[in-house]
Amino acid sequence: MSRLTDLLRQVRQSDTQLARDLEAEITELTNRRTFGLVFEAHQPEAVELPERAIRRGDKVRVLAPRGEIKTNDDRLWRVQRIEQKDAQRVAHLFRLDAEDPETSTASTNDLVVVAEFNDRIYPGLAETGRVKRSDDKPFHTVINSENYHALEMLTYTHRHSIDAIYIDPPYNSGARDWKYNNHYVEGDDDYRHSKWLAFMERRLRISRELLKPEESVLIVTIDEREVHRLGLLLEQVFPEARIQMVSSVINPAGATRFDEFYRTDEYIFFINIGHSHPRPLPLNEEWFTARGRTLKKKVSLRWDGLLRAGAGSLRAERPGLFYPIHIYEKEGQAYLHSIGDAYFDSISEYKTPEGTIAVWPLSSDGIERRWRIGPETAREKAKHGYFRLGKFRREFTSPSYLKRGEQRKVEEEVFPITGVDHNGSVLTETVEIVPEFIPGTQWNIPSHNASTGGSTFNKSFIPGRQFPFPKSLYAVEDTLRFFVKDKPDAKILDFFAGSGTTAHAVMRLNKQDGGRRQSISVTNNEVSAEEQRKLRKAGLRPGDPEWEALGICDYVTKPRVTAAITGKTPEGEPIKGDYRFTDEFPMADGLEENAAFFTLTYETPLSVRHHRAFERIAPLLWLKAGSRGRIITDLGDQGWDLADAYAVLEDFDQADAFMTALQERPEELVVYLITDDDAAFQMVCRELADHHTPVRLYESYLHNFQLNIEGTV
């Protein structure tokens, strides 16, 4: 490297920026992997923001003339200044990344703002609608945005607080199914796999920051084109996780492959973080048929032997659990007289109550062991009928008891009590149950069919609106259930939300058990390649209302989520048909849930710091506080406000009135304090109750996004 160092020193003397760029590339090359998954991780990536107003200092592209089918000029320009000229705003442009200086001018109407993946952003949200059917549940959120920047936004609102991420990323089929740097990635692109891996890695790295480190799961579906590269990428991004892959049949008829086997399945990666693992579930008949088993079986209440065996079972190891159980015999049956206290002397010297026999924790060969529970616990269980004696065998009579789980089944009447025996021990019925289990790694479940549970299913909710290859609702629902069944307040993120299947599945899960789980769905408003061609011919461009109305988010995702909640199609007609499988009821009943819809905005740090962007920052505060109730968008003349889940104070002269209102709120609240004055902030913090969490605006917001550049999230 000495020769390179000398050359860099020479370059630095004439062009410091060029020297820095060369050093960065050399560092990239020296740090590149020489084994494992190697790809062009520094592939450029940018996204166009057609609805963003043009400002001085923006990075822009020049739009293709209206009526032309070709896409925009890829060259990047910087807006130096904007002037008003002949009733138009005209931008003066300076070419970026050009060998020779180049300038130009263009109407701002013919420009589009471009954000590259490593540009620092300051996001906001503009609400575009909501649907509400429950007064006490939080809101699901749908965000119209390029997902990389939406993920950056979520590092402020949901860092380390997401329980599950479910994503169905582009499969990189070469069939114009995704864009990179504003261009569809074709099948003959030599960098197709590198672009896909670079695209995925950036988003997965931010996902790490969102998932709960103590227990969470990332679920990724993929087909055979990228399954092996994705597996290696996941191992590199999540080296500490436990990763497992499932093969799931989604098209029993098979998708045609020329000169190849038909593809009937896809693959599901489960990346378990911390203590995460799938839970055993009482699955429906589909799962049992696939395993060659019957749906139900007859089971009895399970009594566990009181005698401890195996490791740690000796008297000397737990002497407090060595005590006598006094029994007597009557008509050939063992009767319980009493349970003695812990005994620390020789059993040969022990005197039993008159007419009784002492049963000690002895093995068949006479070794002194111990009981599983202490004498007080044994007496309490006997009092309630959860302790029983076996067949009378003098000092070898075997006592048993109900562990807490089995005891709870009696109390919850899973096993109805039919009577008690001569010792007062409960007698219960044998019941027929659906056993809980974790399935294998081959799923062939009819309801997971992507045609009947996805494409055909969606037609009921949004008739006439097409979305390519949607997931089966029931497949997503089942997959998530293994990880959030016991988490009624779980937060689930899908940043490739597409038609909104994940949000729909989370709402279904809530109906089944009364949960308050929240979904966050991120999708762009991309128009299909075929539709784009028609729209361009008609003289339309991205950003035009007629164009945006046909985008994925506005045309498919939002209407589908709304229809699921209201039970009505976008045309106002009751949805025909019934939900099936785990929870069967008419789709027209809708779901008692709430949803709010947003579009990501791009703010300037100056407008944020000077409190001029509060209306767009406000939804982020609402998200961070739990997405409940109304959003505080205007502090009014009093300079503060208090909502369901959070409070905001700007005018510190009104702090006394603000604190008085807070004192009447005993529940947990996030309290946002807008001030640059550290003393004022500390003063209010000292007055807050323990269950009120202070956050300093806009310091916390600006600090978060100043850090969010490539390599630091």
Image (cartoon, helix red, strand yellow):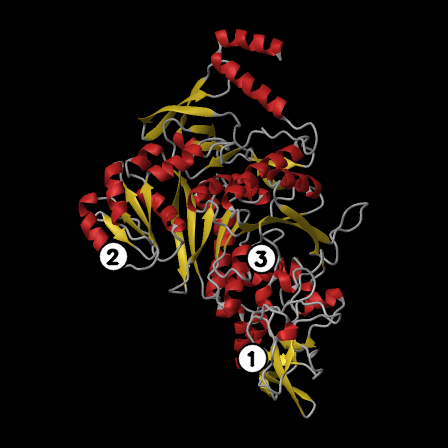
Mark 3 = which residue? 483
Mark 2 = which residue? 663
Residue at mark 3 to residue at mark 2: CA–CA distance: 38 Å
Rendered image quadrant of residue 576: bottom right
Question: Which label lies toward us, 3 or 2?
Answer: 2
Image position, residue 351 (x, y; %) = 60, 79
Residue at mark 3 to residue at mark 1: CA–CA distance: 37 Å
Task: Say whether disc 3 or disc 1 marks the residue closer to the N-terminus.
Answer: 1
Q: Residue at x 26, y 41 (%)?
A: 681
Secondary element at tag 2: helix
Mark 1 = which residue? 382
From the viewer's perspective, is 372 left or right of 608? right
Question: Which label lies toward us, 3 or 1?
Answer: 1
* Figure quadrant of the N terminus: top right
Task: Say whether disc 1 or disc 2 marks the residue closer to the N-terminus.
Answer: 1
Q: How many marks?
A: 3
